[in-house]
Amino acid sequence: MHGIGGVCEGIATGLFASVKANPNVITKNALGGGIFYQWKFRAFKRANSYYYDLYDFFSSHKLYYFFKIISCFTDLRVKKEVEQKGLDVSLHGEKAYTLV
């Protein structure tokens, strides 16, 4: 878990590093920020943003229909009595947390 998070963090830093978040980003050896904040890649970023907007639109609609189909076969929520009693008590027969 920590290894995957570290790899993702390293990649994200290279992509999204910004002077707004950390003024030390611009140094003698640095390129001037992450790849998305460099002037060469702004046109690429703009073109990709339209693609991702379109992708998000279709993904959200697919997800809606996916859950609609699933709801034909089973409930998407637990019953009200089970929810009020608590899922841990209903499924495992014990409380997960004791709140004072």
Image: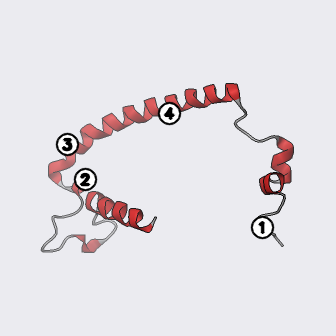
Query: Where is residue 96 shown, x and y percent of the image?
Result: 77, 64
10 Å crowding of disc 4: few (<14), some (14-19), many (20+): few
Q: What residue type is labelled 1?
A: Tyr
In three-dimensional space, the C-alpha distance between marks 2 and 4, rounded to whole angstroms, equals 25 Å
94 vs 56, left or right, is right
Which label number is shown at residue 60? Answer: 4
Please, what secondary structure does the residue beneath circle 4 have? helix
Query: Which of the 4 image quadrants contains residue 32?
Result: bottom left
Q: Which amino acid does label 3 sit on?
A: Ala
Q: Quadrant of the C terminus?
A: bottom right
Q: Which of marks 4 and 1 is in front?
A: 1
Q: What residue type is labelled 4?
A: Ser
First reached walking from the N terminus: tag 2 or tag 1: 2
Camera-nearest residue between 35 and 66: 66
Query: Where is residue 63 shown, x and y percent of the image?
Result: 53, 33
Which label number is shown at residue 11? Answer: none
Residue beneath disc 2: 36
Q: Nearer the viewer, mark 1 or mark 3?
A: 1
Q: Nearer the viewer, mark 2 or mark 1?
A: 1
Camera-nearest residue between 23 and 61: 61
In three-dimensional space, the C-alpha distance between marks 1 and 3, rounded to whole angstroms, equals 51 Å
Instruction: Check the image and report above or below for 4 versus 85.
Output: below
Q: Badges 3 and 4: C-beta atoms under 8 Å apart?
A: no
First reached walking from the N terminus: tag 3 or tag 4: 3
Query: Where is residue 89 shown, x and y percent of the image?
Result: 83, 56
10 Å crowding of disc 1: few (<14), some (14-19), many (20+): few
Q: What residue type is labelled 2?
A: Phe
In three-dimensional space, the C-alpha distance between marks 2 and 1, rounded to whole angstroms, equals 44 Å
Residue beneath disc 3: 43
Please, what secondary structure does the residue beneath circle 3 have? helix
Query: Where is residue 99 shown, x and y percent of the image?
Result: 81, 69
Residue beneath disc 1: 97
